[in-house]
Image: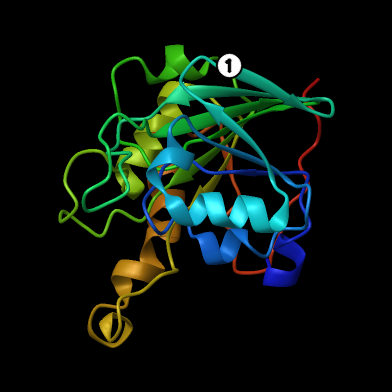
Amino acid sequence: MPPAAAAVADVALVSHLHADHLHPGSLAKLLPGTRLVVPRGAGRAVPGLRRVVAARGLRVTEMAPGDVCTVGEVRIRAVPAEHDGRRLPYGPSRVPALGYVLSGESTTYFAGDTGLFDRMAEAVGACDVALLPVGGWGPYLGPGHLDAGRAAQALARLGARCAVPVHYGTYWPIGMDAIRPHEFHAPGDDFVRHAGRLAPDAVVHRLGHGECVRLEPAR
């Protein structure tokens, strides 16, 4: 969505401390008083986050796997992620990477950044919608990440009725769009194809920049 629209939110979820997920300059655009949910230890590990929180009057909730908070009528539960949660390159290793399960009229799983792990479905529980990262950059990032194929495997394990591929097509390294554009444009389409084979009952919404989808409440 356009940056101005993204600034108006009831809550902003930060899954881990990598700079493409926790960017103080972007968080500084949130309206004063916005609830900001972050992994436990984030404030200690990222001085820039502390400064933004103080300057903007953000309301911070730090969470670890299993913790629960509420925002209005939405229940937010932190779940584990298989990912290095540190602020790279030298951040403290004890800050966890998280996913979040949001429960209201429907239940949505936001995976953040994660690889497949054995008890993923058990940790997440039943969900209607899965927001899954698919931009694995081919074979280069190694464990702790999902590419389009592994994200489709995750969708099959979770049994969600809808999925939205995320975390691709943005933050391109300079010049890479001209050299290997498929690495950044293809993952969404690849996920649709893999999901059709591995999770045929799920509906996949592949959204372009600025697009949105309104899902029917769970019945």
Tag 1: residue type?
Ala
Relative to 137, residue 204 above or below: above
Visible residue check, residue 21: no
Q: Is residue 56 left or right of residue 82?
A: right
User: Quadrant location of the C terminus?
Assistant: top right
Expressed as whole percent of the image width and height from the top left, the position of residue 32 reads 78, 54
How is the model colour-coded?
rainbow
Visible residue check, residue 84: yes
In the image, 21 versus 89, the foreground residue is 89
Q: Is residue 172 left or right of residue 205?
A: left
Q: Residue at coordinates 29% horizontally, 24% vertically from top-left?
A: 117
Q: Residue at coordinates 31% horizontally, 78% vertically from top-left?
A: 181
Relative to 73, residue 197 above or below: below
In the image, 210 versus 55, the foreground residue is 55
Q: Which residue is mark 1?
A: 126
Expressed as whole percent of the image width and height from the top left, the position of residue 179 reads 23, 84
Expressed as whole percent of the image width and height from the top left, the position of residue 24 reads 52, 60
In the image, 93 versus 170, the foreground residue is 93
Q: Is residue 106 left or right of residue 116?
A: right
Residue at the right extreme, as displayed: 72
Image quarter of residue 122: top left
Assess disc 1: are there few (<14), some (14-19) or many (≥20) residues with their C-alpha within 10 Å of its C-alpha. some
Image quarter of residue 107: top right
Q: Is residue 215 left or right of residue 198?
A: right
Q: Residue at coordinates 53% horizontally, 49% vertically from top-left?
A: 50
Expressed as whole percent of the image width and height from the top left, the position of residue 18 reads 36, 51
User: Quadrant location of the N terminus?
Assistant: bottom right
Q: Residue at coordinates 30% horizontally, 29% vertically from top-left?
A: 94
